[in-house]
Amino acid sequence: MIIDGKKIAQEVRDSLKEKIAKLGFTPGLAIVLIGHNEASEIYVRNKLKACEEIGINGMLYRFEGTEDETEIIACLKKLNATSSIHGIIIQSPVPAKYNEEYLNSFISPEHDVDGFGIYNMGMLASNRESLIAATPSGIMKLLEHENISVQGKHVVVVGRSKIVGRPLALALLNKDATVTIAHSQTKNLPEITKTADILIVAIGVPKFITAEYIKEGAVVIDVGTNRDSNNHLCGDVDFENVLNKVSYITKVPGGVGPMTIAMLLNNVYESAKKGAK
Ligand SMILES: NC(=O)c1ccc[n+]([C@@H]2O[C@H](COP(=O)([O-])OP(=O)(O)OC[C@H]3O[C@@H](n4cnc5c(N)ncnc54)[C@H](OP(=O)(O)O)[C@@H]3O)[C@@H](O)[C@H]2O)c1
């Protein structure tokens, strides 16, 4: 069965729109965009549009990429202290002259709706309530929506990035999954992935995972967003090659991708709700 991420993301957004309307005020998301990266311009435009559709006030704070780091930090500090702003994100990647992690550290934990900060990551690692990064929480939502329990299952996460693999593995562990994290230094990868009840792949290598990596009847979640040799969007999983072997699978596009923005918006809502208390 193909998991329809687009449909599930729309359901999340519709429900958020209703919940936001009941808040009695408009949540605010500040998006800090530094430099002129073509892909980032598109992502930011999509985020702003998504905000508008569900009643969040999305605000763009643009920097040329020529400014001194202190200028951007001053802006982040001001945003933290602005009562109408409930979430702050810095669009990644930032130009090489800046240290992205350092800049992110100036976003207060309450405003860290990307969930990339040390505080929220630490809370997640301690199995305490936190703002969880949008892609991992989107994947958890997809599984939950399809009634795929992770409890006691062997889940193999391929990829250990700070934005996907790592927080995802922790979120799965917090839901009682037995988690294996694999990465580029892992030996005998197919032997490990073949033991997965649920295989989640976030490596950024087009169509890397083929049928030989998968156990019959496994659930496969493909996070990869790549271009194949014909410049078509594709995942890290060779979809056609594995389709007959899996019980559930996500497609690229239309799988994990749409969930990411929906869950970012959800974090803004959660943060606004908390701030209002
Ligand atoms: N759909 C969405 O919303 C969404 C969101 C975020 C990312 N993505 C996509 O997901 C993919 C991964 O993104 P990312 O930011 O996590 O990437 P990343 O920071 O480049 O991390 C890639 C991870 O994969 C591992 N890896 C690379 N090649 C491997 C191989 N051949 N075998 C096993 N492990 C391998 C790396 O191992 P090492 O740690 O050893 O280097 C690393 O941990 C990309 O295609 C990205 O575009 C999609």
Image (spheres, rainbow, N blue to C red):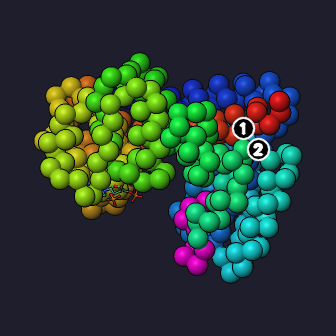
In the picture, residue 28 is in which quadrant? top right
Three-letter code, disc 2: His
Which tag, 1 or 2, sits closer to the chain's start?
2
Furthest toward the front, the residue is 126
Give the dominant element type of the magenta stretch: helix, strand or loop: loop
- Give the camera-side residue of 6 and 271: 271
Where is residue 85 shown, x and y percent of the image? 80, 47
Q: Which residues are magenta?
A: 90-98
> Which residue matches tag 1?
271
> Is-magenta flag for residue 82?
no
In the picture, residue 146 is in which quadrant? top left
For this view, does 184 lie left or right of residue 160?
left
> Is-magenta flag for residue 92?
yes
Q: Quadrant of ligand 1?
A: bottom left
Image quadrant in which the C terminus is located: top right
For this view, does 12 lie left or right of residue 238?
right
Three-letter code, disc 1: Ser
In contact (CB < 8 Å): disc 1 and disc 2:
yes
Q: Is residue 183 above or below residue 10?
A: below
Residue shown at 58%/78% (left/top)?
A: 97
Q: Which label is found at residue 86?
A: 2
